[in-house]
Image: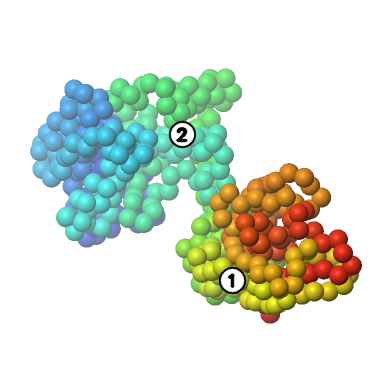
């Protein structure tokens, strides 16, 4: 009864299962899913809910896999529980979709769970992850590299997925089943250390327990709980920013860089903008700079910093919308967010926003965006360089590269606006054609 009381208390505290719920249980026939089902059968004496079992035969272990399927069906029949079983060839599925076996298996399981949930009109899917699974997940993610959110282990409740036995150790599960004479299946692949997770479970954790600390798993789980509490506190702190249409820069600068990164990530997620560390770092770099600035986030959106506010607007400039335009010298055109001008003038002080060329009055230039394979002989050099390499060397953000104007003559790029000119077209006379580029106000 001790274990059951632990599960009742966890369920009461986290409201995992409530009156009227209809669950799908992921049932492999192994000790974890059998224990979960046994506990839920007991819980039905206290709460009015119903559930079905869902079993998938991955067709990977031959007779053993068929044994598990037969066991699952018989287990449900003996206890009056409806069982949905299906064979899915995940080897073929993985090849067709370019997935690993592990990814294909997960795709198959979760897809079938959702299918049966819809069929029975259910509202939750119960999975049999235990306390050891949480610790192994922590160790796995730690070894691969992750942030604090990735070190939370496996949450007991996320969306429609619940894990009622996630705080019960494997040894407790096996002890309960063996003491009560409850049958279960053993997946022989779990005893092989060929895969990283198995190796962590079979090799790494036992080694640490024997060599350093016999209570290692308890210590790790305490750390997981502490990380989870910290993350929950941070989430509560930043929740007030989740629906903001604008961010006050002074306000978010009061937070640490880590929390600020989460605020910015949530801000971008509202627009379904892909978030990565590089993008957050780019935004960080403009927060403390004065004046108005823009950062292209995607083909659809641009981040605008105006005075003390950050906001996201629709990006009126995309690679597809920037059609090439001709520019006859002298002349001026608008191109995306730029105004490009060609004028005949006396050479004055040079800077990145202008380029003096040997192009002649009356020549017609073409202004366009980059194409695959574009090259230029940068000023001061003899050989050609790819535009991609120049952008990388100049630390031009990926989001900006497809909107930078290229002023071309014939097949040659004369000037990468605001970045580099072509050595071949460098002006050497006292009076030259000056190319200039400035942002629209």
Label 2: element kind = helix
Task: Specify whether 411 is left or right of 20.
Answer: right
The disc placed on residue 136 is 2
Residue 29 occupies quadrant: top left
Observer-nearest of 348 and 87: 348
| Residue at mark 1 | 325
- Label 1 Cα crowd, 10 Å radius (few <14 / some 14-19 / many 20+): few
Q: Position of residue 317 (x, y in %)?
A: 56, 70
Q: Position of residue 152 (x, y in %)?
A: 50, 46
Residue 271 in view:
yes
Instruction: Name which residue lies at 29% across and 46% down.
Output: 110
Residue 191 occupies quadrant: top left
Task: Specify whether 165 is left or right of 354.
Answer: left
Instruction: Name which residue lies at 50% across and 65% down.
Output: 320
Dot in front, 1 or 2: 1
State which quarter of the image contains the C terminus: bottom right
How many numbered tags mark residues here?
2
Task: Specify whether 193 is left or right of 90.
Answer: right
Instruction: Name which residue lies at 15% across and 42% down.
Output: 83
């Amino acid at each position: 009864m001790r274990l059951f009381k632990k599960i009742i208390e966890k369920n009461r505290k986290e409201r995992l299962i409530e009156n009227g719920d209809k669950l799908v249980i992921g049932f492999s026939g192994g000790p974890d899913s059998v224990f979960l089902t046994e506990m839920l059968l007991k819980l039905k004496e206290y709460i009015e809910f119903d559930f079905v079992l869902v079993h998938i035969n991955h067709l990977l272990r031959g007779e053993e896999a068929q044994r598990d399927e037969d066991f699952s069906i018989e287990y449900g029949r003996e206890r009056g529980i409806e069982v949905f079983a299906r064979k899915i060839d995940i080897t073929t599925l993985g090849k067709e979709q370019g997935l690993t076996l592990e990814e294909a298996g997960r795709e198959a399981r979760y897809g079938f769970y959702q299918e049966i949930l819809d069929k029975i009109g259910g509202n939750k899917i119960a999975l049999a992850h235990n306390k050891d699974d949480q610790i192994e997940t922590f160790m796995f993610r730690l070894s691969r590299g992750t942030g604090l959110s990735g070190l939370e282990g496996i949450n007991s409740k996320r969306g429609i997925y619940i894990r009622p036995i996630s705080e019960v150790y494997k040894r407790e599960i096996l002890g309960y089943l063996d003491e009560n004479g409850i049958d279960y299946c053993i997946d022989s692949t779990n005893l092989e250390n060929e895969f990283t997770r198995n190796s962590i479970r079979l090799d790494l954790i036992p080694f640490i327990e024997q060599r350093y600390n016999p209570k290692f798993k308890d210590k790790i789980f305490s750390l997981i709980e502490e990380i989870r509490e910290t993350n929950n506190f941070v989430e509560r702190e930043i929740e007030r920013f989740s629906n903001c249409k604008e961010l006050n820069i002074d306000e978010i600068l009061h937070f640490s860089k880590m929390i600020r990164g989460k605020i910015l990530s949530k801000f971008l997620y509202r627009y379904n903008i892909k978030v990565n560390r590089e993008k957050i770092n780019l935004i960080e770099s403009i927060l403390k700079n004065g004046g108005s600035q823009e950062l292209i986030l995607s083909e659809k959106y641009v981040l605008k910093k105006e005075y003390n506010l950050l906001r996201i607007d629709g990006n009126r400039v995309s690679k597809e919308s920037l059609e090439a335009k001709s520019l006859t010298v002298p002349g001026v055109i608008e191109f995306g967010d730029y105004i490009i001008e060609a004028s005949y003038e006396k050479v004055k002080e040079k800077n990145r926003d202008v380029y003096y060329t040997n192009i002649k009055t009356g020549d017609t230039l073409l202004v366009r965006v980059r194409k695959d394979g574009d090259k230029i002989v940068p000023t001061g050099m003899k050989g050609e360089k790819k535009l991609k390499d120049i952008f990388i060397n100049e630390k031009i953000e990926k989001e900006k590269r497809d909107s930078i104007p290229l002023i071309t003559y014939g097949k040659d790029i004369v000037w990468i606006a605001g970045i580099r000119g072509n050595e071949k077209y460098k002006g050497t006379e006292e009076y030259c054609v000056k190319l200039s580029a400035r942002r629209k106000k």
